Image (cartoon, rainbow, N blue to C red):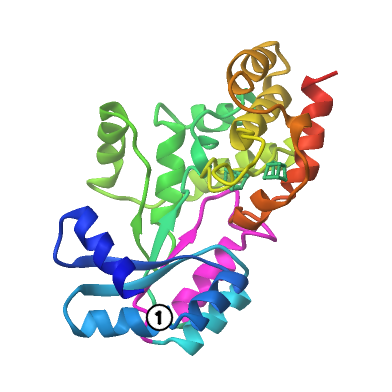
């Protein structure tokens, strides 16, 4: 780990890291990190002043998180996936993971508060519930939901332009958690999402680098989700003319399984690609 760590410092042009995370911990990844004594190395580096705070980012069940924090109580913070749709999701287990953080007294950083953008561009049936409350953006409800959860000390909102930053600042400057009416609207939006059976891909793109068929997996999933939401031709255009122009089509998948090993959401990518092919390659 040391030469790797030194190269990270060099690439970032810094002498130390404020927050250093054991990346994307799950049952399997944790086993590997343990075998490499990565945690022990990170704690050593902290003693040497090269890391201020050692933490981890996490994608697995609450039971696995409990195991990690029990084995390594020196971990100072945990980054978890949390948003209102995944809060009670049986595979993501946002609420349960946050409860584990609270039990161990570890502050939580939230990633994916807007679920890869899925909670920003809401389907009409969902949007109306927030519109009935006033003019605040759908993103504002998602980020305030995350920031209002007990034990959360930071929300990574993934802004991509000045307008989004201004929007974020407008409601985070003088932060107020969601009130009862707003929480009710959130529940209604959750119900709409549940009924749509969308692929819960967060577009992190961890799966694409190793694909021998160069399939743009998250973009193809987005096409299918868009089709299921809007039922129009637009998704077909993007499928045929944009996302499969330079990369493989869904049917080009050779089922090697590399992508599934990399997916933090544990999606059955091979089977889902069959659904994509069925829809767009009729
Ligand atoms: S299983 Fe299919 S999509 Fe996944 S890496 Fe292999 S070829 Fe690519
Ligand atoms: S790794 Fe999983 S969640 Fe991330 S883009 Fe690929 S399919 Fe989506």
What residue appears at the point 51 percent right and 45 percent down from the top-left corner? 204
Q: Say which element carries label 1.
A: helix
Number of numbered discs present? 1
What residue appears at the point 27 percent right and 60 percent down from the top-left corner? 8
Q: Nearer the viewer, residue 268 or 209?
A: 209
Is residue 18 found inside the magenta-colored segment of the image? no
The region drawn magenta spans 74-103
Q: Quadrant of ligand 2?
A: top right
Q: In the rendered image, which quarter contains the C terminus?
A: top right
Q: Is residue 140 left or right of residue 65?
A: left
Q: Is residue 18 left or right of residue 75?
A: left
Q: In the rendered image, which quarter contains the N terminus?
A: bottom left
Q: Which residue is mark 1?
A: 39
Q: Nearer the viewer, residue 278 or 34?
A: 34
What residue appears at the point 70 percent right and 28 percent down from the top-left corner? 224
Q: Is residue 258 left or right of residue 115?
A: right
Q: Nearer the viewer, residue 230 or 27?
A: 27
Identify whether 212 is placed above or below 37: above
The quadrant where residue 54 appears = bottom left
Identify whether 248 is placed above or below 20: above
Identify whether 258 is placed above or below 125: below
x then y, percent, for residue 50: 19, 74
x then y, percent, for residue 30: 54, 75
x then y, percent, for residue 143: 41, 46
Q: For ligand 2, tell me if the residue under mark 1 lies within 8 Å.
A: no
Classify mark 1: residues with Cα within 10 Å, few (<14), some (14-19) or many (20+). many
x then y, percent, for residue 148: 40, 57
Is residue 75 found inside the magenta-colored segment of the image? yes
């Amino acid at each position: 780990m040391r030469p790797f760590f030194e190269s990270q410092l060099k690439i970032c042009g810094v002498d130390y890291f404020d927050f250093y995370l054991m990346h994307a911990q799950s049952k399997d990844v944790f086993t590997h990190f343990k075998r490499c004594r990565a945690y022990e190395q990170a704690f050593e580096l902290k003693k040497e002043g090269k890391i201020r705070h050692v933490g981890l980012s996490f994608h697995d069940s609450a039971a696995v998180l409990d195991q990690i924090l029990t084995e390594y109580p020196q971990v100072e913070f945990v980054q978890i996936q949390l948003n209102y749709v995944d809060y009670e999701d049986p595979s993501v287990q946002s609420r349960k993971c946050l409860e584990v953080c609270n039990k161990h007294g570890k502050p939580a950083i939230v990633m994916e508060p807007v679920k890869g953008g899925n909670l920003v561009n809401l389907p009409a049936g969902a949007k109306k519930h927030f519109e009935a409350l006033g003019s605040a953006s759908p993103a504002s409800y998602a980020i305030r939901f995350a920031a209002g959860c007990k034990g959360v000390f930071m929300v990574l909102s993934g802004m991509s332009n000045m307008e989004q930053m201004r929007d974020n600042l407008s409601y985070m400057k003088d932060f107020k958690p969601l009130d009862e009416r707003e929480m009710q609207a959130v529940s209604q939006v959750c119900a709409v999402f549940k009924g749509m059976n969308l692929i819960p891909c967060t577009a992190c793109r961890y799966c694409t680098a190793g694909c021998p068929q160069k399939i743009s997996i998250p973009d193809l999933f987005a096409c299918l989700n868009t089709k299921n939401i809007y039922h129009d031709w637009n998704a077909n255009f993007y499928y045929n003319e944009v996302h499969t122009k330079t990369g493989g089509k869904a049917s080009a998948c050779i089922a090697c399984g590399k992508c599934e090993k990399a997916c933090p959401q544990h999606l059955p990518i091979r089977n889902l690609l069959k659904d994509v092919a069925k829809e767009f390659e009729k």
